[in-house]
Amino acid sequence: MKCRKKFDGLISLVSCFFLVAGLNFLHAQEERPLRIIAFGAHPDDPEFQMGGTAIKYAKLGHKVLLVACTNGDIGHWEMSGGELAKRRTAEVQEAAKRMGTEVEVLDIHDGELLHTLENRKKIVRLIREWKADLVFSHRPYDYHPDHRNVGLLVQDAAFMVMVPNFCPDVPRLTKNPAFFFFPDNFTKPYPFTPTVSVSIDDVFDDKVEALDALESQVYEGGALGSPETRKKRWGGDPVRRVEFLKKSWSNRHGRIADKHRASLVEWYGEDKGNEVKHAEAFELCEYGSKPSKDQLKQLFPFFD
């Protein structure tokens, strides 16, 4: 009987410990702005994948850094090299101004991002320097080698950001961030499954305004475009080009909302979840921290 009482007391003590730890986590998140860093393969990927969510964070006073892991210097049908890299850097810098975020473009050639120790260290240093609470990236299953390698590099950083003797020139993080994947439509080895889905209806027009700055990609078609692409999407008419952009991205985010409707209902409730027209979605990576649902609500402070 005495042993049973001691065991019950130990269980109660452990339960209290985890309860206090959870409350401390929530309290800490309330005391300071969240710090979010997102890694995309090219100067446009983070903006495309989570621009609406980034704007929502920024409007709430949180800090967002969008990182392009290559300079995009082959991502156009008509121009390339340093000229294109400078153009695309200027485009994402303008988009960041419109979004209220920060941006960084790494000096790595487009199409040549490799899964190397050197690049892993770059990712670890950026996450540490930003003191990130949340980290976003592509999944490591994608049509583009740069996308795949971004996913691998960020996954490899998930534990190393806390190891003090790895990249000791930058102080380690004492708390592992939560790592999330962008959505995609690939099904092997397994399909994207959202952990959190976010309505961007309230900032959809803001996202369109930001993407409007990415002219080389959204109006000229990037690497696979042509003069016909530019004529069809823009034709020199600034009103027509924004109408095109708004319609195409409404369709894209509408498809995400419809595909992940169950997740939206989970987070917003049945009525609000079914009303969402435009959404972005994210899947938790198992390699970082594993927040509870209450902690996810603190990390994504958009749900009533």
Image (spheres, rainbow, N blue to C red):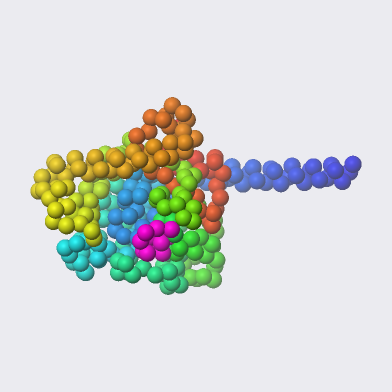
Q: How many marks?
A: 0
Outermost residue to the front: 188
- Percent position of residue 198, x then y: 41, 40
At 14% from the left edge and 42% from the top edge, which residue is drawn? 240
Q: Nearer the viewer, residue 30 or 95?
A: 95
Magenta residues (range): 141-151
- Percent position of residue 274, x then y: 41, 30
Q: Is residue 75 above or below residue 54?
A: below
Q: Is residue 143 magenta?
A: yes
Outermost residue to the right: 1
Q: Is residue 51 magenta?
A: no
Outermost residue to the top: 271
At 11% from the left edge and 48% from the top edge, which residue is drawn? 235
Name the dominant secondary structure of the magenta segment.
helix
- Percent position of residue 142, x then y: 40, 58
At 13% from the left edge and 56% from the top edge, which residue is drawn? 227
Question: Horizontally, is 33 left or right of 224 in the view?
Answer: right
- Percent position of residue 268, x then y: 45, 33
Q: Nearer the viewer, residue 42 or 176?
A: 42
Which quadrant of the rendered structure holds the N terminus? top right
Q: Nearer the viewer, residue 66 or 174?
A: 66
Q: Quadrant of residue 300?
A: top left
For the question of whether residue 61 can be seen, the reply is no
At 54% from the left edge and 62% from the top edge, which residue is drawn? 159
Q: Nearer the viewer, residue 261 or 238?
A: 261
Which quadrant of the rendered structure holds the C terminus? top left
